[in-house]
Image: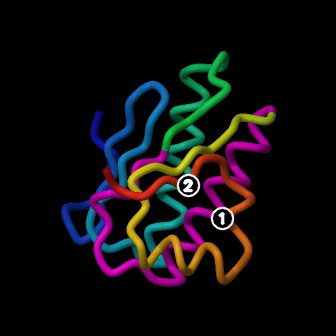
């Protein structure tokens, strides 16, 4: 499924229970990512867990942290859906720890 984002630094691939982020995520990308997750959850109301794969993200920064925080909020507002991060780059993991979000999302795992 295409994300509807223009070809550019940030990409997303959504499946019924997963978001795969690639490239560089900017603050301008965050509303579109949240809309993508909302659409994914609207299309699968029985979803209780969404995996968000960050393995393809380059140059993780505070814009990515903002995206993770807002995606987590969208998931919780959709009836307590759990957002699980996977393949989290080391730099992103450190930022999530720094701002206290590593404990706010489930199963923050390093890339395999």
Residue 23 magenta: no
Q: In this view, does 54 lie above or below 97?
A: above
Farthest residue to the left: give it: 7
Where is residue 70 shown, x and y percent of the image? Answer: 65, 61
Mark 2 element type: loop
Where is residue 82 shown, x and y percent of the image? Answer: 68, 39
Instruction: Tell me whether circle 1 and circle 2 mark residues in contact (CB < 8 Å).
Output: yes
Residue topped by disc 2: 108
Q: Report, in whole angstroms, how far the alpha carbon at label 1 lies from the one at label 2.
A: 7 Å
Mark 1 element type: loop
Farthest residue to the top: give it: 46
Local packing at callout 1 (Cα closer than 10 Å; few below 14, some 14-19, many 20+) is some
Rendering quarter of residue 41 = top right
Q: Is residue 65 above or below residue 109?
A: below
| Boundaries of the magenta span | 52-79
Residue 68 or residue 4, whichever sits in front: 68
Rendering quarter of residue 16 = top left
Horizontally, residue 24 falls left or right of residue 40, namely left
- x 34%, y 51%: residue: 12
Where is residue 74 shown, x and y percent of the image? Answer: 69, 49
Where is residue 87 shown, x and y percent of the image? Answer: 39, 54
Residue topped by disc 1: 102
- x 73%, y 54%: residue: 73
- x 61%, y 55%: residue: 71
Q: Is residue 106 above or below residue 80?
A: below
Residue 65 magenta: yes
Q: Does label 1 or label 2 sit earlier along the sequence?
A: 1
Q: Is residue 1 above or below residue 60?
A: above
Quadrant holding the N terminus: top left
């Amino acid at each position: 499924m295409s994300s509807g984002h223009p070809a550019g630094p940030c990409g997303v691939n959504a499946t019924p229970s997963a978001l795969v982020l690639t490239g560089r995520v900017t603050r301008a990308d965050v509303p579109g990512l949240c809309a993508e997750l909302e659409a994914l959850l609207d299309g699968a109301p029985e979803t209780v867990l969404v995996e968000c794969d960050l393995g393809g993200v380059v140059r993780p920064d505070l814009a990515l942290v903002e995206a993770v925080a807002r995606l987590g909020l969208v998931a919780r507002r959709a009836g307590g859906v759990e957002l699980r991060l996977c393949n989290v780059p080391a730099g992103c993991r450190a930022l999530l720890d720094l701002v206290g979000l590593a404990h706010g999302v489930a199963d923050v795992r390093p890339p395999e």
